[in-house]
Structure formats: structure tokens, C-alpha cells
Amino acid sequence: MTVKTQMSIGETMIKKIAVLAAAFAFTSAASAATGMAKIKGTADGSTIDGTVKFEDTPKGLKVTAEFTGLPPGDHGFHIHENGLCDDAGKAAGSHYNPVKTPHGDVVKDGIHKAHAGDMGNITAGADGKASLEVVIPKVKLGGGDYTVGGRAVILHEKKDDFGQPVGNAGGRIGCGVIVFTAQ
Ligand SMILES: [Cu+2]
Ligand SMILES: [Zn+2]
């Protein structure tokens, strides 16, 4: 009887370990870093409100943005180097540019031909709504050489025309800092 009881305790433990191992494997597989930036207007009384979500994927950093309250038209949309929005967004510094390239379109041309933060434009309709989904190759939220966690997302007054040095997109009408939601 004693032996049988011990066996059954042993089996129960093995089953528990198996369940824990399966749970750990699932957690590991689902542990790609994710992040978010809440974008607010830099001017008093601004109607700009945005949520930008970030996710590390095998193809690069997936960026999904949703905005309301924007002036209709195209607006330059970049990751800037500092995680600060003070002084009407100026504290965010310049475009995140770890490879020291000219300004461009990183989604299309990659980090060796554009600043890693050059996501191009986001286009608002007459209703002030805009959405965008892009993947930035070789860039990650955290870990590796090119990381954007803790930096700022800037939305510009005007269209990024991909001219030098920073796309002629004018003032910084929206800003938010990228925070990790899972690591
Ligand atoms: Cu910018
Ligand atoms: Zn740039």
C-alpha cells in the first residue's frame, strides 16, 4: 500500500511538471516584446489623440497606429531619438538615426538608406481619422543594436516629402513616448 501511494504521488508530480513545462513553452513562444505610445497634441486644446502599438516580429518592428482629431492630409510620422515631449516636442531631438544615413523611407528602403525612425506619412481623412500599419526591418522594441523602446513618436504638421535633412515636415503637432507593455 505504501509503495503504491508513493508511486501515485510521483506520477502526480510528473504530471504537474509536464503541465508547468508546457505553460513555460507557451509563455516563451508568446513573449515577443510589445509596446505602446499614447500620442497627445503638443498645443494647448489640441484634439489630437493617437495610439501607436509596437511588436517585435521576425520581419522587424510592426507598428500599428490609430489617430483621431488630426488636421486632414499627410503628416510626417517618425521615431525620434529621445523619449521626451517637452517644449512642443522639440525635446524629442532628431530622427532616430543609429546608422548615420540621410533621411528617407525606412519601411521601403531599410536602415542603411534611411533613418531607422523614418516611417513616412500618416494620412488623415476629412473626419480627422488616420491609421497605418508598417514594419521597420531590423529594428526592435528592445534588445539588439537598433531599439526604439523609450524613444518618442512624433507626428508632424506637414507632409514628409523625403527631402533632406529631415523631410520638410514642419512643426511637431503630436508626441508620445514608447513604453513596454510586455518584454
Ligand atoms: Cu519627425
Ligand atoms: Zn529622418
Image (spheres, rainbow, N blue to C red):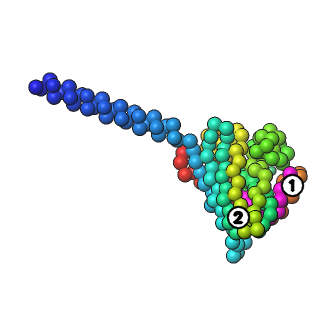
Percent x, y for residue 66? 66, 59
Above or below, 77 against 5 in this view is below
Q: Crowding near pointer 1: few (<14 within 10 Å), some, many (20+)?
A: some
Q: Looking at the image, which residue sits at the far top?
A: 3
Q: What stretch is highlighted in magenta?
A: 152-162
Percent x, y for residue 63? 67, 49
User: At x 77% / y 41%, what residue is drawn?
Assistant: 111
- Amino acid under label 2? Lys
Disc number for residue 28 = none
Above or below, 139 against 37 in this view is above
Q: Can residue 12 be seen in this view?
A: yes
Q: Looking at the image, which residue sits at the far bottom?
A: 45
Between 152 and 77, the one lying in front of the other is 77
Cα distance between the residues tagged 2 and 1: 21 Å
- Quarter of the image containing the N terminus? top left
Displayed quadrant of residue 142:
top right
User: At x 86% / y 54%, what residue is drawn?
Assistant: 161
Q: Crowding near pointer 2: few (<14 within 10 Å), some, many (20+)?
A: many
User: At x 71% / y 48%, what residue is drawn?
Assistant: 134
Assess whether mark 1 and mark 2 are in contact (beta carbons under 8 angstroms). no
| Residue bearing mark 1 | 161
Q: Which of marks 2 and 1 is nearer the N terminus?
A: 2
| Residue bearing mark 2 | 129
In the rendered image, residue 166 lying in the magenta stretch gets the answer no
- Quarter of the image containing the C terminus? top right
